[in-house]
Image (tube, helix red, strand yellow):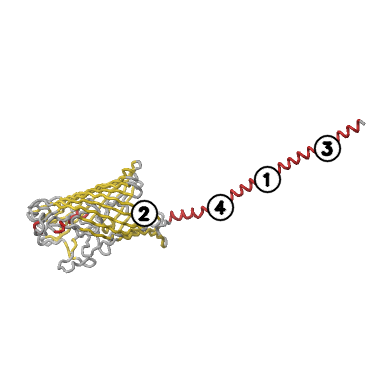
Amino acid sequence: MTTLASDVQALKDNLAAETAARVALQAQVQAASARADAAEAAASSARSELAAFQDAQIKTIPAQVAAEVKKERPTDAFYMRGVKITPGGYLELAGIYREHNLANDISTAFNTIPFPITPQGHLAEYRFSARQSRIAALVEGKVTSDITLSGYGEFDFQAAAQTANSNESNSYNPRIRQLYGTVDWADSGWHLLAGQTYSLVVLDSKGITPRNEVIPVTIDGQYTVGFTWTRQPIVRLTKDLLDKHLWISVSAENPQTTFTGAVPPGVIVTINNGAGFFAGATNTLLPATQSLNHVPDFVAKVAVEHDIGAHHLHAEVLGLARDFYQRYTGLTNKDVWGGGLGAGLSFQVIPGLFDVQASGLWGQGIGRYATGQLPDVTFAANGQIKPIHESVFLLGGVVHATKALDVWAYGGQERASRAAYGTSFGYGNPNFLNTGCEIEGSAPTTCIGNTRVLKEVSAGVWDTFYAGFWGQARVGLQYSYIERDAFSGVGGAPKAHENMVLTSFRYYPFQ
């Protein structure tokens, strides 16, 4: 009996152990299944995240490609046979008010501000003009990684055939502002320019490179008194050194001479225009003429670039040499040399906020290289050409008040020295009559009024009220005060002045 009871108890214990084992196994199976489900869920989530990441990466590819394409081919240019073409220019409507009537368009002839002797000295003028609107294009071809060929053209509508000359801006029909080609050798640092552009005497802002000239931001197309410049055909060779911190350049530029004073008998300094130039004024017997020249003007310039912290400084010095040519009494040809020395700088006083510029030119026979267009030379009693001593300087600044608003101001002066020969020759001769300059209706012979000094103070604003996909639109306002003081002569030293207000609306479709 005892043995049977023991066997039953053992059987019960085995059954309990088997039950416990089955429960434990079932729990293990459930746990394993749960882990498998979790692993599957994790794998599924990982697969979803990977797919989403891959989709996102794939979607960025067009943008990256577009960005790379934009680097090489920006949207403001188009391409033809590998040549990059960038259009430029603007459409302008300007308003012009002058206190005294100069009968000028958008470009002011500062040296003709009238004395009271003329009716113009008592009359105001106002007009609209769209003639400063311009068309431009830059063409660039990358021949190799070292050599770049470029061409630039810029045209406006200010030409006037009857008054076109080669004095300063070469304003023939059609009116070419700039039209030149360049070759740049990046590795060796040589740069060649040939064509019509701003003279090397113009202040630069970046090395000695085209389209980086520091041009006054005036509305007036003749800029401001004291600005030294011409736009004329030139050949220029430039070398950059010391990682483009030092630049050296020389140019040969189109010659032209401006004269003043009585020309003694037997002296020839001009010639009637021939083919390719305006032949003469309509309804007059006077032919149009140009000066005798047989040697180009020469300019040499050295410029340095330096960053003082975040403030960029550009400074330069230059020399100008000019030849004045005449057929002299005694049937001989004669050359007289003139020229001058110049200096200039542009400086970021507060980067991104305030920029200043200063420039000057001093010498003899330099009149046509300045905005006011005082004469280059006069004549001695024996007929010899005499260059006129002159000094020119300009100081200006631009405040970038906001990204859209610029406020600017300039002050400049052009001063000539007296060049008197005998009693009736020269420039500023103290024997010249000025007795009628202040009296309206007096005979012209009673007011010689040779200009001794031109002075101007100008200020204005430019507001870019729209900038976006469709280009830029700007409005501008300028006020200028100009004084014209004559040399003293018989009857005193007459003075004239001009108050001028200019307005501008410009649309730049390609900016």
Q: CA distance from mark 1 to mark 2?
A: 61 Å
In the rendered structure, which amino acid carries the disc numbered 2?
Tyr
Camera-near label (4 vs 1) is 1
476 vs 162: above or below: above
Residue, far right: 1
Residue at point 81%, 36% (across, down): 16
Could you tell which of marks 4 and 3 lies nearer the N-terminus? 3
What residue does disc 1 label?
37
Q: Which one is in front, 243 or 436? A: 436
Q: CA distance from mark 4 to mark 1?
A: 27 Å
How would you rate the neighbour count of disc 1 (Cα within 10 Å): few for under 14, some for 14-19, many for 20 or more? few
Label annotation for residue 376? none
Q: Could you tell me residue 415's position as x and y percent?
A: 17, 50
Q: Which one is in front, 445 or 191? A: 445
Label annotation for residue 466? 2
Q: Quadrant of the C terminus?
A: bottom left
Q: Could you tell me residue 128's position as x and y percent?
A: 26, 60
Label annotation for residue 15? 3
Residue 54 can be seen, yes or no: yes
Q: Are marks 1 and 3 in contact (CB under 8 Å)?
A: no
Q: CA distance from mark 4 to mark 3?
A: 59 Å
Q: Is residue 442 left or right of residue 363?
A: left
Q: Are marks 2 and 3 in contact (CB under 8 Å)?
A: no
In the rendered structure, which amino acid carries the disc numbered 3?
Leu
Q: Secondary structure at mark 3?
A: helix
Camera-near label (1 vs 2) is 2
Q: Quadrant of the N terminus?
A: top right
Could you tell which of marks 2 and 3 lies nearer the N-terminus? 3
Label annotation for residue 55? 4
How would you rate the neighbour count of disc 4 (Cα within 10 Å): few for under 14, some for 14-19, many for 20 or more? few
Q: Could you tell me residue 494's position as x and y percent?
A: 12, 52
Could you tell which of marks 1 and 2 lies nearer the N-terminus? 1
